[in-house]
Amino acid sequence: MVPSASVDRTGVLTKLFRSQSFHRRFASIWGTNYGFKTMNRQTYLAKNNEVKQDWLLVDASDKVLGRMATEIAVILMGKNKPTYTPHHDVGDFVVITNAAKIKLTGNKFDQKFYETYSGHPSGRKLYSYRELVEKKPELLIKLAVRRMLPKNKLATKMLSKLKVYAGEEHPHQAQQPTVHELKSA
């Protein structure tokens, strides 16, 4: 059995404090929040036309693939900005040069494989990372970054802002990309 009015440590009836008449009586004296000032704050949500997207240039020579890919994924998502909004594309454009000079730690060049499967019998193909660096270094970086982006339709839009080139040259001088140094070595 639960008593109708219980007494707390100070001896004040808790039923009194829970009653509507008590709150009505003291709301005029203390206000609705009983003397405490509250902030009316709303979370900022960026709109597509409000976001300024910059162009960044990253040199991938002698950078570790995974560490570089995580930082680039954060930039593409826009999580490095205070205006980050999960359901909008607020990230920057990233141009990566020297993709052929990327590093992998350990023996991953020979022990790690990229697998494709056509869906047909004997349609499975394995490529070592060494083969990919020699033939398609752009694909290697795009795959690493893609797997670190969210798994939704917005990720394809984010990935389209990633431009990867095997050499030093790139066709984006008109956008005037600023050189961005990654935190990881």
Image (tube, rainbow, N blue to C red):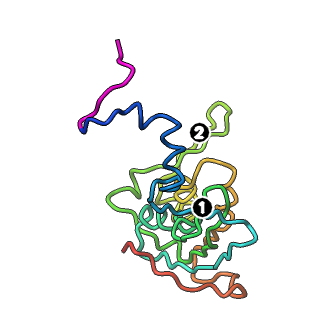
Q: Is residue 73 above or below residue 27?
A: below
Look at the image and tell me in which quarter the N terminus lies. top left
Q: Nearer the viewer, mark 2 or mark 1?
A: 1
Q: Which mark is residue 124?
A: 2
Label 1 element class: loop
Amino acid type indicated by mark 2: Arg
Corner quadrant of residue 146 = bottom right
32 relative to 63 in the view: left or right? right
Q: In this view, which residue lies farthest toward the left?
A: 9
Q: CA distance from mark 2 to mark 1?
A: 52 Å
Residue at horizontal 38 percent and vertical 72 percent from the top: 184
Q: Is residue 7 magenta?
A: yes
Q: Residue at x 61, y 34 (%)?
A: 122
Q: Which mark is residue 42?
A: 1
Residue 119 is situated, as x and y percent measured from the top left of the image, at 67, 34
- Segment colored magenta: 1-9
